[in-house]
Structure formats: C-alpha cells, structure tokens
Amino acid sequence: MITPFKEDLLLDEEKYREFIRFQIDNGCQILTMGTTGESATMSHEEHHIAMDIAVDEASKSGKNPFVLAGAGSNSTKEAISLSKYAENAGVDAVLVVVPYYNKPVQHSLIDHFSAIADSISLPIILYNVPSRTGRNLEPETVAKLANTKENIVGIKCASGNIDQITKIIKTTPDDFLVLSGDDSMTYHIMALGGKGVISVASNIIPSKMFEFTNNMLNNEWTKARNMQLQLYDLFKVLFIETNPGPVKYAAEIMGLMNKRMRMPLTPPLEANQNKIKEILRGLELI
C-alpha cells in the first residue's frame, strides 16, 4: 500500500486507516510498509505505527484479511528488530527484502535471512528486487533457504527474469509461495504456478486485481488473458518514473489520497502526468 502524508509530511493516520478499509472492502489482502509505501524514508517508529494500524483495521473489518508487513533492512540487526515488532503486533507474516547497497554475496544472504528466520516464528516471504537493491537473490539460494528454514515460506519475485522465476518454482517445495512483484508479469508467473501478486496497481484498482488473480486461481485463463491485455498499459505507465510516484499521482486524481512523497522521491513530471491521465481515461478510471 502507498502511504498518505499530511502537509508536514507526517504519516496521515486517519487517511491510512481509510485507505486500508478501501483495500479490504475490495477483496485485497494487506501489505503495510513495503517499498511502495516509501518504507525507506519511514522511521522505525513509523513502521511500528503503520503495522499497528494495519492489524487494527484488519481485525475490525470482519473479513479477516491477511496482513503482511515489510520488515527488511540492509542491517540484519534492524531487520530482526522490525520483524520481532511485527510478530508482537500480530501481523500474519513479514516481507524481507534483499539488503540494499551492501551487496552481500549469496552465502552472506543465506546467513542474513537465516538469522531473521531464527529470531521469529512468523512466516517470512523473501523479496528479490535486484534493480533496487543491487544484488540478485539466486534461485539456488532461494531453494536452500526454502528447504532449510521452515518459516521461510515464499518469495516476491521482482527480478523481471522469467527464466529465473521458473527455476525457483521448479526447485522449491510445492507449498512454497511464489508471488509476482511486477504487475505486468503476474499472468506469466501464475501460469507457471505462482499464487498471486504483491501489486502496485491494486492501490488504485483493487477490485480489478482481485478479479484478475482469482480468474487465474480458478483456471479462468481466457478471462485472465483478456484482463492482462486490458490492464497492460496501466501496469507499464505506473513505472514511467520511479515507483510509487506514478501510482500516487494516479491515486490523487482518482480522489484516493494526495500525491505527496518524501524526498528524494518527487511526483512525476507534467509530461508523464499527462500520460498517466490518458491511460486512466482510457480505462474510465477518471
């Protein structure tokens, strides 16, 4: 989920609650403090607040949505701290990104994720996004973690490499949860056995993404293919600049929340705003 900010760029807690309810009411599960939520510019205290709000709204909804919380860091100690807080807060699982900037080698990544897994009993979903972290989590590393740590239960794949994702599905246990981390590749990944998507587009079209993924889970592949082609331009334009700038701008013109972002990220340029508007109009979203 994207994160709403007030004019002073503090977390807008009431708007966040409203936005969580909007996601739940449209069939989505919840991810708080993922990278689309600008977690890199949020303090640990703000992470804690966001986790608490997500758990509270989920419990009040009556729909029992799954609550996933981002708890990664390029410091293993900090990732353990965030993961422990998430467990105590009552989330259902944590999403742990490959450490960024440090560029640990594969055996170091095994030690990093193993240390986190040993510190909590919560399920852990790995997050591989080499374009943002500078380090790829290799399929052999994923398989070793999946086969040696019981609470490492899945992975969000945002490598853009379908061959690599195929290897992950092939070499991990049958119940290992492979999720797309890229809206435009969700169809392809689910066709290989993936179970869904941790989505950017769902911030603005939650009911459509719910329908899209459920078509595939229910083997309605022709319907899903039609939706893939219908939504493809939206999936792509939401990355016309660095995420979450485009989706926050789209959310603003759709009346969901303002487009304020914490620097160093800023809203899209006017030319790109116009491209986003054009796609939204084409889909009758504005």
Image (tube, grey):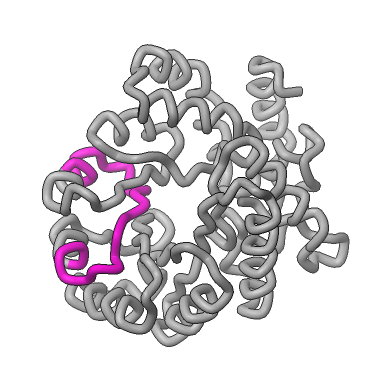
Q: Nearer the viewer, residue 260 or 127?
A: 127
Please tell me in which quadrant of the rendered image residue 49 appears.
bottom right
Please tell me how many numbered marks the rendered image carries.
Answer: 0
Please tell me in which quadrant of the rendered image residue 186 appears.
top left
Residue 71, compared with residue 244, is above or below; it is below
Q: Residue at x 54, y 47 (%)?
A: 29
Would residue 266 be found to the left or right of residue 123 on screen? right
Instruction: State whether residue 278 appears in this view.
Output: yes
Instruction: State whether residue 246 appears in this view.
Output: no
x, y (%) of residue 58? 64, 55
x, y (%) of residue 127? 37, 59
x, y (%) of residue 262? 71, 62
In the image, residue 180 lies in the stretch drawn in magenta: no
Q: Nearer the viewer, residue 136 or 55?
A: 55
Residue 181, compared with residue 185, is above or below; it is below
Please tell me in which quadrant of the rendered image residue 79 appears.
bottom left
Q: Residue furthest front?
A: 62
x, y (%) of residue 249? 72, 41
Residue 199, compared with residue 278, is above or below; it is below
Would residue 78 be found to the left or right of residue 203 on screen? left
Q: Nearer the viewer, residue 135 or 65?
A: 65
Magenta range: 145-166
Q: Nearer the viewer, residue 116 or 75?
A: 116
Which quarter of the image is occupied by the C terminus? top right
Q: Residue at x 31, y 56 (%)?
A: 154
Would residue 185 be found to the left or right of residue 51 on screen? left
Q: Residue at x 34, y 40 (%)?
A: 195
Q: Residue at x 65, y 26 (%)?
A: 275
